[in-house]
Each structure stands twice: as C-alpha cells, then as structure tokens.
Amino acid sequence: MIPLKVPKWVAGILEIPRDYTSLSANFLKELRKDLSKFSSDSPEVSIVMPVYNEEMNLIQTLYSISKMELNCSVELIAVNNNSTDGTQFILEKLGVKNYFQPVQGISHTRQMGLMKAKGKYHLCVDADSIYHKDWLKEYVKTLNDKNVSVVYGKYSFLPLFGSRRREFLALYEFLTGVFFKIRRREREYLNVLGFNFGFRTDDGHKVGGFNTTRPKWSDGWMAMNLQSLGKMKQIHSEAGRVWTNARRLNEDGSLYKAFKKRAKQNLNFFTEYFNKFNFG
C-alpha cells in the first residue's frame, strides 16, 4: 500500500535540523557514538554511501543509519566525489570512514566504494535518504539465501514540507510500482535503484564491478550482470522501504514530466508482453 503520510519514525527524523551548525554538542556526541558501531575492521557487511554536496541531507541520513539494529559486524563507508560544501567536514566530525574520489561521476564513486569495502555483503545507500531500523537485517537475511544474488526494496519520496505527501506523489509511486511488477517478468534489473540494493561483495568483483563508462544507470547495470550468478529478490516489508529525496523528480522538471518520461520508457514493455500472449 502506498503511504499518503510519512510514518511517525520518519517524521521524527525530519524534525532534526539539517544545518550541522544548529545541532547541539550533546546531539553530535551521541550521533558520533552511535555511528562508531559501524566501524568494524572485520565487517560482515559494508554499507557504502556515495556523497556529493550533501551537507543539508547528510545528518538525517546518518542519524537513520545510526539507529539501525545490528546482528553482525558492519562498516559504513562514505565516498566523497568532489564535494564543495561542508560534506567532508561533517563526515570527519562524526567519525565516518571516508575516501575521496577525484573522478567525477556516480559510477566512479560506487566503484571506489566496492574496491574499499571489506564486508561479505555490500549494501548501497544514498546520503539523501532515510532508512528503517531493520533495513540492514532484512537485507542480510535475504542475502543469506545463496540462491539470491541481488536484493532490492521499495521506496517513497519525502514531502518537501510537513509530514503529508501530495496525493499525486502517491499516485506516481503506485503507477511506477505497476511498472516494477511488469519488468519483474524479464527485466527485473531495471527495478534496482542505487539507494536501496545489495549484493555479495565478491560477486560484484566477479562481474567486473560498476560500469564506469556509463554516467548513469550503474546500479541497474550491476544488477543485470549479477543475474548471471543468482536470482533477484525484492523486499516487500516496510522495513525495506527507503524514504528518499524528491529532487530526483525535479531533475525532470516536474512530477508530471518525470512520470511522462518514465511512462514513455516503459510503453515498449507493455507492447512486448502483450505480443507474447494471444489475446485475440
């Protein structure tokens, strides 16, 4: 079911000031302490987060990660891709393990994260998204099935103001969910989004890592190649749902243009599937 209102736990995180300088010393001390649990030298899980000018989103994301319940050793890695704002300062002040990627581009940033990751499992997150406390456990549990090579989850967009979301935003997510179900028949890898998926680190190396020749869609490309090693699995529980910034839609100009663009991209899928069955 598509939520029309953000859950209370998300609303609580949204109340945290985005500006690092407005946070109390006690809050920052506690956050750094909680994040220290994600600094294992021998991790079973690597959470890898590319960052680029995320000064105003990073605190809320890191707070949500810090509240994750752990049942294994974990490392959190941030890969800074030439940020010019206070992103690097925040990472260092909060003690987050980080690396600098001078080559611009998300595919290069994700690839460096893969090369630096030590964990058996590689979980991809973004610095402008909010994660459930059981998100990591759900992903690890799914990847414990040796037949699964890729795990991914649902997502919802965060409202710009308050806790209520525009109905059109929920409608957009409902219709894109329909596309998700259609693509699962043959092209499920197109459902994989970089802020909400995972795989085995060794498998990522086996298939050649992230494709750095592609400026976009490095996540789907990785998932497509990983299909040769096992099946894909979507997490349907709310713990697997990620709440992410709606600026991805703004890149297309408006919510309407974003949906129109994606509808056009998926129209050929409808044609293909209808042609496979004899409805006449």
Image (cartoon, rainbow, N blue to C red):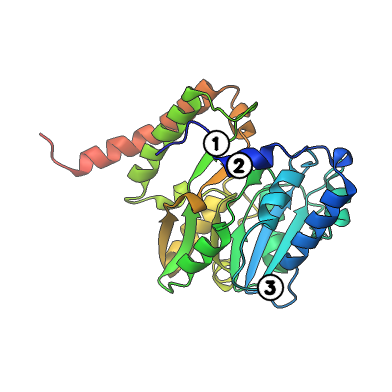
> Where the N terminus falls, by quadrant?
top left
Residue wearing tag 2: 10
Residue type indicated by callout 1: Val
Instruction: Count how many numbered circles sit on residues in the image.
Output: 3
Residue type indicated by callout 2: Val
Q: What residue is at 77 percent from the left and 42 percent from the top? A: 54
Residue wearing tag 1: 6
Secondary element at image label 2: helix
Mark 2 or 3 closer to N-term? 2
Q: What residue is at 62 percent from the left and 27 percent from the top? A: 250
Front tag of 2 and 3: 2
Badge number at residue 118: 3
Q: Position of residue 43 (x, y in %)?
A: 67, 74
The Cα–Cα distance between marks 3 and 1, rounded to whole angstroms, is 34 Å
Identify the residue at the far bottom of this view: 42
The Cα–Cα distance between marks 2 and 3, rounded to whole angstroms, is 30 Å
> As rendered, which of 208 and 106 lies closer to the eye?
106
Q: What residue is at 48 percent from the left and 31 percent from the top? A: 4
Secondary element at image label 3: loop
Crowdedness near tag 3: few (<14), some (14–19) or many (≥20) residues, C-alpha within 10 Å: many
Q: Are marks 2 and 1 in contact (CB under 8 Å)?
A: yes
Residue 100 in view: no
Residue 148 in view: yes
